[in-house]
Image: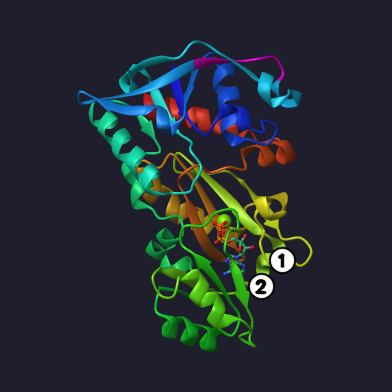
Amino acid sequence: MKILFIADPLDHFKIYKDSTYAMMAEAARRGHEIHACEPFELALASGVVEARTRQITLTGDHRNHEPQVWFRADAARIGPLTDFDAVLMRKDPPFDMEYVTSTWLLEMAERAGAKVFNRPRAIRDHSEKLAIGEFPQFVAPTLVTRDAGRLRAFHAEHHDVILKPLDGMGGMGIFRVKDDAMNLGSIIETLSDNGARTIMAQRFIPEIVEGDKRILLIGGKAVPFSLARIPQGTEVRGNLAAGGLGVAKPLSARDIEIADTVAPVLAERGLLLVGLDSIGAWLTEINVTSPTCFREIMDQTGFDVAAMFIDALEAAAN
Ligand SMILES: Nc1ncnc2c1ncn2[C@@H]1O[C@H](COP(=O)(O)OP(=O)(O)O)[C@@H](O)[C@H]1O
Ligand SMILES: [Mg+2]
């Protein structure tokens, strides 16, 4: 297959821990052609969605290589996305208007016959924070609003809450407010931009000390191990980007119940790869843009997440 990866700049990849890189390495090992571009290289010209892409070759044993030498790139060429057997959208958030625009372009390419994963419409339709609302049976008490009065009432009812923006990632803008309500007013004003932006309040889940578990769903099936990201020191955030420690664990019975319920629904919508986050018994996020944690799970458990993904991709693209 010819596989196009739309991703952030390749020379910024930390290949020892990058999930997109793990996918590339497994695809290359199987003899697939790897091509790459960045979202800004997409274009719509005379009704055709095209991209400026480069074929890349992975060099040697990649794991210990310096970032600048892990690949060799051929000359760039411009051509329609339908030239590829599969197009993988692997751009990280922020999910801003440019991201939305790229999903519109990719959806047009799909109409012309391109196979795009995850399906652009499904990426657009699933807010990573709000999509849990479709599965209320798995969600801790949660309120989404921009009304300061309702947010204060939610805190008064639940005493210990997390407040967060709807478009954050990597632990950005996460605040915990305990029973004393210290700073509640200022946090609500700041996060909601004085009522101009909708935010989320959620009951604090004490099991966060055991980690915020990343459960990967691939082609409608769960990877059997989660990566629990455990907050360190005085930090409330488990995100690896916020210094969380990643520990792979077998899925709990509840994790399996959540995954088995959610996975077929999302796979049916063209979400080939999804990263659920759960804390304790509760589903907290449904990541659909560019889920990660492949490498940590592979290294700690020996389970080949990248092979499972490329298997699913081969099946979906054919
Ligand atoms: N309801 C909650 N209870 C306890 N901790 C939470 C809760 N919601 C979020 N957190 C903490 O904040 C971190 C980031 O929250 P999350 O909603 O996953 O946002 P992000 O998109 O930034 O990863 C989590 O890893 C966890 O440590
Ligand atoms: Mg998260």
**What colouring method underlies this structural image?**
rainbow
Place of residue 195 in the rendered image (x, y in percent of width and height, measured from the top left): 40, 75
Which residue has dot 1 on it?
A: 209
- Please give the name of the residue rendered at 32% of the width and 34% of the height, measured from the top-left corner: 106
Instruction: Mark 2 and mark 1 in contact? Answer it, CB < 8 Å.
Output: yes
Front residue of 300/78: it is 78
* Residue 100 vs residue 281, the one in the foreground: 100
Give the spatial CA distance, label 2 vs label 1: 7 Å
Q: Is mark 2 within 8 Å of ligand 1?
A: yes
Residue 78, magenta (yes or no): no
**SS of the residue under disc 1:** helix
Kind of residue sitting beneath label 2: Pro
Q: Which mark is residue 206?
A: 2
Residue at image point 54% right, 54% down: 169
What stretch of residues is rendered in magenta?
Answer: 55-61
Residue type indicated by callout 1 = Val
Can residue 140 be seen? no
- In this picture, residue 135 sits left or right of residue 297: left
The reply to whether residue 185 is visible in this rendering is yes
Q: Is residue 21 left or right of 110 when viewed as pictured?
A: right
